[in-house]
Image (spheres, grey):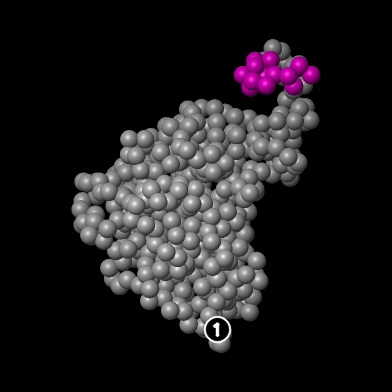
Amino acid sequence: MVAEHLTDDKDLWSFMLTCHGTHAIIACSGGFWRTRFNSVFDPSPGKTVDELKTLYQYRRKKLGKPVDFQAGHEADEVNCLRIIRDLAIESCNYWGMGRSKNIDRLREFVTKSNLLHKLFCGRPVQLRMTGLFQAIQLLLTHWSLDLSMKCPTYSFEISQKVVYTHPDVTPIFKHRVSTVNMTYLLHIVNFFKYHITVPEEKTLHPFFKELAEDQRPRAWDNGIDQGLSRVGTTWKGTYAYMDSRLVRQIRNVRAGSAIFMDGFGIEWGDGAFQSLHLDFDPAHCCPWPRGFEEHLQALPSHLSAAAVHGHAVEPRRRGRDYLLFSGTGMDNIPFHCSGVLHALPPQHDIPGWQRISIMKKFDPEPRPPADPSAYAPSSSTTADTSTPNPFTPDWDQTGRDGEAGGHIDMSTDDYWCYEGVVLPGGKIILGRWFSPNEDRAQCLNTGPFIFWNVPAY
């Protein structure tokens, strides 16, 4: 059939209009439309030929039409956002080896649209971005940080103020940890997007630019499914910080009125990006101490477990609702960590969100010398795994569920809390770090962080 060789849709439509007979043959050819659909999109199991034909034509029409994204309220915006959501959920639904066609279609659309141009902008209340729009932008964070996409950054000064706000003022989660604060996470993305993609800023951009392609944020390569799921083991990332005096100032200035100096540890060369290796082997994971739980409230409650499952969960079955993990890494100094991962409910009909909580402790190693040149750039790539795991006290008591009763002395400044969200697909983590040894009413030692999954060699 001639139509099978017409890869351009415009040529196909023109060919179908040559005569009634040609149109009837192609329109009624079930095999043709299934083949056509699978040549452009990942397979969509369970759909009839007529459904595939209709879906193919609808997607190609909507995605091929220019859309000016503002806040996600207009009909054209809503239609495209729903298609993007469905393409993401159905992506990587292919058999055998190869790239996901759905992800290729998403990249094509993002490249030619302004979908990721304004992650946040000071719009009037009536133009506040819809939840689906925000969720889609978060889902595509890896392309916001892609230097080749050249996505412009707006309202950085607003995002900078927000990412240093007190956790009680701008929490990561709402409604008993069942709802992700999309706006706050988008501010984190916008913040790091500015430092990574704007060459003139000379903070993270020079170091990010030197990373190999496979060491940068990338799209998911597995299906996006709902529920608890292990994430990758090898991560790269960074966090930002400010002097407590500056944190007080930025919290008190009018939003957008000033830009402050952020710190990233870039004076240590390769240390601009810390490494993190997670281990989910139960034999290597310690019970979750009560002291950690007091600061992070990491274990899912009965209510949050019910929100994920859609029904009440028996207490004796709660251990299935979260995973414990241990970890090591290098943040100029080697560190160990312990953490909890649990599933969140779908957000705006997108599955695959998870909450991650980490307690990080620097190993008792010598502090870096005053002269940064004393450290070679390659010295910050791996942790010293020979240092014993510090989270192994004498567990002589048992707490609730995975919580341990043993005591850990957290009075030193070597402990740091990380609370965040694993985005659908499991390739990017966004969140906030803070000190467990500071007055909660102040919480000046805090800031944003980002991790992205990289291949394990």
> Which quadrant holds residue 173?
bottom left
Q: In the figure, 214 relative to 439: above or below? A: above
Number of numbered callouts drawn: 1
Q: Main secondary structure of the magenta part?
A: helix
Q: Is residue 206 left or right of residue 96?
A: left
Q: Magenta region: which residues?
A: 1-15
Locate residue 119, reporting x and y percent. 40, 43
Question: Does any portion of residue 333 appear in the rendered image?
Answer: yes
Q: Residue at x 27, y 48 (%)?
A: 261
Question: Does any portion of residue 348 appear in the rendered image?
Answer: no
Q: Is residue 126 left or right of residue 358?
A: left
Q: Could you tell me the amino acid type at mark 1? A: Asp
Please name the residue that numbered disc 1 is placed on. Answer: 394
| Magenta span contains residue 4 | yes
Q: Residue at x 30, y 56 (%)?
A: 242
> Considering the image in quadrants, where does the N terminus appear?
top right
Q: Is 17 in front, or is 106? A: 106
Q: Is residue 437 left or right of residue 102?
A: left
